[in-house]
Amino acid sequence: MTDRLRIAVQKKGRLADDSFDMLKKCGLRFSVRGDGLLARVKNMPVDLLLVRDDDIPAFVANGASDLGIAGENVLVEEVLLSNGKMDAVIDRRLGFSRCKLCLAADADGAIQIPANLSGTKIATTYPGVLRNYLSEQGIDANCVEMKGAVELAPSIGIADSICDLVSSGATLEANGLSAFETILESEAVLIRSSRTLSPAKQNIYDKLVNRIDGVIRSTDSKYIMLNAPASAIDKISQILPGSDAPTIIPLSGSDDLVAVQAVCTENVFWETLEDLKANGARSILVLPIEKMMG
Ligand code: PRT
Ligand code: ZN
C-alpha cells in the first residue's frame, strides 16, 4: 500500500471553508460531500480526515492523522487539559481565522479589570486556558464550564463575567458586554506531532508545506508597477512596503521618467498609493500575485 499523508481538517464550521480554500490553493484537488469522514485528494497522496475541530489535536497526537489544521485556541486548550502530555505542536501559523480569547463583563458593572475577578464566577468553553491564566495571575475565581452560548451567562445569572472568543466584537456588544483583557491571540495553525514521518510521507509533507508557505506569502503580496522621475526612486523605494530592490526600467522617449516594478510582501493600502503619488509616482498599478516560490 502506498503511503498517504493524512491531514485532519474541520468538517464544518468557521475554520472549514478557509482550510479547504488554502489546500485548494496548494493545488490539492478534492471534494467534500455528505457524511464521509475521509476525502481523498485526487492528484496527491493525501487524505483529509473530516472531523470536529476539538478532536484535531488528539488525532494528530495519537497518530490517527499526520497533520491537522485547527485554531491555536483549540490546540492550547487541549494540550493544557492533558497537563501538557499531548504530543501536538504548532508546525506553522496559517494567517486565517484570527480571533482573541477575551475576558468580558457588563460594560458598566463591578468587573473592569482582572483583579476584580477574585471570588466571582466566569463562564467559558475554555476551562483549561482560563484556569491556567487565573493561576498564573494569582486570581482566585470560579470557572463555570459551558458548551456554548457563553455570552448569555451573565444576563441569566449563571456567571459574573465570561471568557470567550471575540472576532468582530458584535456578539459582546449585542449582549451589553465589554472585553477588558485578552488571554490569548489565536489564528489557524498547522499541527504536527514529534513522531518521525516515513520517508515517503516526509516527501509529501515537504512539498505541501513549501506550497503552504507560498500561499501564505502570496496572500498579502502584491506586484506594483509605476512610473516616476529617476530622482524620486530612492524615496519611492523606501515607501514600497516589504519589497527588496525594485526593478528599474528606462522608459523609451523619456530622459527623466523610469518604470519601477516591485513585489511587496506586505499589504498595500490606499495610504501607501497616496504617499507614492505625493512623491512623484504616476500610473500606479497594484496587481495580485497568485503563487510564489522562493
Ligand atoms: O463543530 P465544531 O466543534 O468543529 O466547531 P465549533 O462550533 O467548536 O467551532 P467554530 O466552527 O465556531 O469555530 C472554529 C474556530 O474558528 C475556533 O476554534 C476559532 O479558532 C476560530 N474562530 C475565529 C472563532 C471565531 N473567530 C469566533 N468569533 N470561533 C468562534 N467565534 C465565536 C465566539 O465564540 C462568539 O460566540 O463567534 C462569536 C463572537 O464573534 P464576534 O464576531 O461577534 O466577535
Ligand atoms: Zn468545536
Image (tube, rainbow, N blue to C red):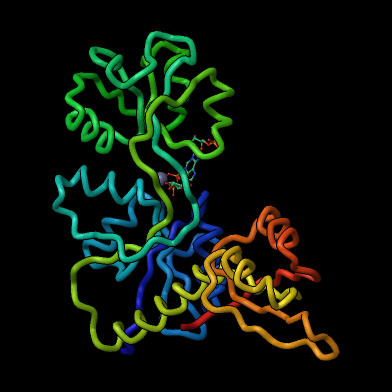
- Whether 47 is drawn above or below 272: the answer is below
- Which residue is at 82% across, 91% downward? 252
Nearer to the camera, 39 or 139: 139
Q: In the image, residue 273 lies at what x, y percent? A: 71, 60
Q: Is residue 248 left or right of residue 266?
A: right
Q: In the image, residue 286 lies at what x, y percent? A: 71, 69
Q: Quadrant of residue 282?
A: bottom right
- Whether 79 is drawn above or below 114: the answer is below
Nearer to the camera, 4 or 95: 95
Q: In the image, residue 89 lies at what x, y percent? A: 25, 60
Ligand 2 - quadrant of the structure image: top left
- Which residue is at 42% across, 79% downward? 210
Q: Residue furthest right?
A: 253
Nearer to the camera, 29 or 247: 247
- Which residue is at 65% across, 83% downward? 248
- Which residue is at 52% across, 75% downward? 244
Nearer to the camera, 82 or 165: 165
Q: In the image, residue 35 lies at what x, y percent? A: 50, 60
